Amino acid sequence: MTTVIIKYNAGNIQSVLFALERIGAKAEVTDEVKKIQSADKVIFPGVGEASTAMHYLKERGLDDVIKNLKQPVLGICLGLQLMCKYSEENTTDCIGIFDEQVKRYPQTGGFKVPQIGWNSVYNLKTRLFEDVKENSFCYFVHSYYAHLGEHTAATTNYILPYSSALQKNNFYGVQFHPEKSAEAGAQILKNFLSL
């Protein structure tokens, strides 16, 4: 089985590689279209800013490549946001796999933005969360969130309830970082690799 991590100008790829190694899996980091298209599993991670990342993807035609993949695809953090229709971060049109919009957290007394740290995920749906307990804690770092919608596969509450996971057909996205989410995160990565 081949797993690729899409290489683009968004950080955090190394920690995803290490997390896969910990569960006995290997992945290749690449931006080569043929390798991405022929892989069994594709991971689309990201830490960064939406408009810069979309510009990079569009320049290389990777936005269309990602949208047309037929194998299981996992977007992580910015990866999930870029798979949505639109992000308020620098008014960015995104890939549009999910209909959900990505909004900035409202400024509210007592809550820091970005959300940094552990938070629970609940209303778990899809095989991605098999053997993951309801209200498991996962690690988040983000200022923007995807609305609840028809593709919501898990929910988290910070300032308001939002989609901490999305799923549509072969596309999965998680707002948290499974590679930094201890046992729950390791199980989610194992589940993704066994889809």
Image: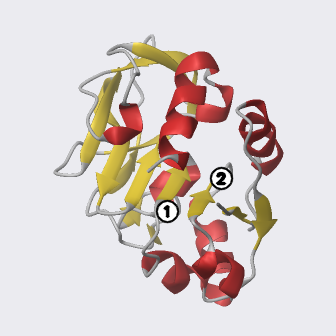
Residue at image point 65% right, 52% down? 46
- Tell me which label, 1 or 2, sits earlier in the chain: 2
Q: Which amino acid, mark 1?
A: Leu
Classify residue 92 as left or right of residue 16. left
| Mark sitting on residue 29 | none
Toward the left, the furthest residue is 150
Q: Is residue 112 visible?
A: no
Q: Which residue is mark 1?
A: 82
Residue identifier under label 2: 46
Query: Residue at the spot x=23%, y=26% of the render?
Result: 123
Kind of residue at badge 2: Gly
Residue 78 point in image, percent of width and height: 56, 52
176 and 29: which is toward the camera: 29
The N terminus sits in image quarter: bottom right
Location of residue 15 by image quarter: top right
User: In the orientation shown, which residue stands out farthest toward the front?
Assistant: 1
Which residue lies at the image location 51% right of the left edge and 75% below the top edge?
66
Which one is nearer the viewer's eye here, 62 or 100? 62
Spot occupied by residue 101 in the image (x, y as percentages of width and height): 31, 57
Q: Residue 173: tell me if it is visible.
A: yes
Q: What secondary structure is marked by label 1?
A: helix
Residue 194, horizontal then vertical, whole percent:
49, 46
Separation of residues labelled 1 and 2 (CA atoms) = 9 Å
